[in-house]
Amino acid sequence: MEKRKRRIIILGAITFAIAVLGGISYWIYQRVETIKENKELSKQIPSYIHDFFDKKSASDYPLSPMKPNWKGRYLLFDEFANLSYNKKRNEELNTHKYFPNEEINGLVLVKPERKILGYYKSKDSDVENSANEAYQEFYVISYFDIKTETLIARDTIWGALPKKENQTVKTNTECFLLLVHLMRKN
């Protein structure tokens, strides 16, 4: 009877471990596939949009504040070293129907940034380096009007503050839900 309980426990633990590893593997697979798909879609960004940001970033354009009057005809791109299409966010905003070749009136550019607020003190060393930075992530949202070739608005969505102790700070992805909510109002 004792052997049987031991086998059941071992089989249960093995089954649980396989399920957990399978779930993690599937999550990683989904992430990689999303990155690949966005990379392929980014290759389809029309050349006239690439021309705006070929050697410039959104912050290089003049800011002329006004309310976007794009009638929902815009696209959202992530602004890293170059523009990157984000399929999921455009689908949430219902702007994916304009990609890649429909006429649009504006672009919403999302650029991730981080602000160093200090450094965590180490027991071993007081050297300040990137490994012990206490930073706050944030996103700069730029609204670029295609007809006037100017920035018409700029927002900042701040992420979570760093932990008081040296722990991994997670990205605040919930801020994009706020962005989706704000963009649906326009």
Image (tube, rainbow, N blue to C red):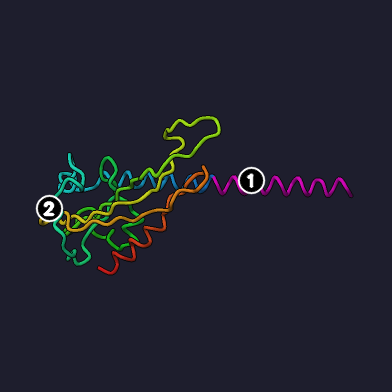
Q: Nearer the viewer, residue 44 or 147?
A: 147
Q: Which residues are magenta?
A: 1-24
Q: Is residue 12 magenta?
A: yes
For image coordinates 83% across by 49% down, the residue present is: 5
Q: Which mark is residue 18?
A: 1
For image coordinates 48% across by 32% down, the residue present is: 126
Determine whether 73 is above or below 114 in the image.
Answer: below
Q: Amino acid at mark 1?
A: Ile
Q: Nearer the viewer, residue 43 or 159?
A: 159
Q: Which mark is residue 85?
A: none
Relative image position of residue 20 (x, y in whole percent): 61, 48
Q: Amino acid at mark 2?
A: Glu
Relative image position of residue 156 (x, y in whole percent): 30, 55
Q: Which mark is residue 149?
A: 2
Relative image position of residue 40 (x, y in whole percent): 31, 44
Give the secondary structure at mark 1: helix
